[in-house]
Image (cartoon, grey):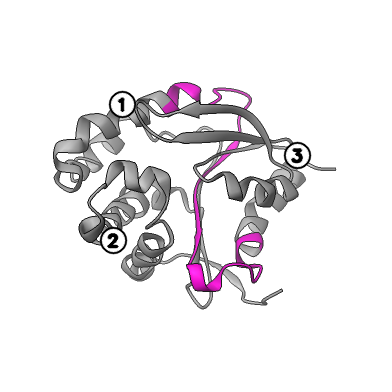
Amino acid sequence: MAIDPIIKVQKPDLKLLSSVLAKTFFDDPVSCYYFPIEENRETALNKFFYIHMAKLYFKFGNVFCNESKTGVAIWSPPGAKTDDLRSTISLLPMATILRGRTIKALKAVIYLEKKHPKSPPHYYLATLGVLPEEQGKGYGSQLLRPILELCDQQMIPAYLESSKEKNLPFYERHGFNVTDEVNLPKGPKVWLMWRDPQE
């Protein structure tokens, strides 16, 4: 297993880490659903993840990377507001990236938000990504550890949505279980996963 200290992301790193996520999620089914034109996808994802991190989740202080900056974990804490007016306004630049797919993307987000458990309070893993060439070295597990350890110490559950079936065993090894399988409107399947705190 690779040893690479996990650190909190700082603002100057957001652009670099957005490019890491753009490469990581290039072939992801939901990325392809949002950005079907392959030659434009990485550029669009780069901008998408920058807004995702910088405008929506960075304020919560739970965005982590490994020291070599080849992986990122983005969490929101229990009770975090990502659908308030200020957050909605901050996401308006997404419309220029999505262009004619804004309505489709919005429907998908609303659909998943309705499926998102409202209680009990929990940490939400919004994004976990490691560069393809660095996967399988243990970085994903390391990136999960800070919040999962906190969950266990404070007896707080965690929740995520996985858009790749092959990733389910990885999350299951970390205590997550599939609670539902859903299809985005005219789109790919997404697996909803919940983790109770571990003794």
The tally of labels here is 3
Q: Residue at x 22, y 60 (%)?
A: 39
Q: Which residue is mark 2?
A: 42
Task: Bin the neighbour count of mark 3 within 10 Å (Cα to Cα): few under 14, some 14-19, many 20 and up.
Answer: some
Tell me, yes or no, if residue 85 can be seen here: no
| Residue 2, picture quadrant | bottom right
Q: Earlier in the sequence, mark 1 or mark 3?
A: 1
Between the residue at mark 1 and the residue at mark 3, the CA separation in whole angstroms equals: 32 Å
Residue 107 numbered mark, or none: 1
Q: Which residue is mark 3?
A: 197
Residue 137 falls inside the magenta stretch = yes
Between the residue at mark 3 and the residue at mark 2, the CA separation in whole angstroms equals: 36 Å
Secondary structure under tag 1 reads helix
Q: Residue at x 17, y 41 (%)?
A: 95
Residue 98 numbered mark, or none: none
Magenta segment range? 112-141
The amino acid type of the residue labelled 3 equals Pro
Q: Earlier in the sequence, mark 2 or mark 1?
A: 2
Residue 65 position, x and y percent, is 51, 66
Residue 137 position, x and y percent, is 64, 71
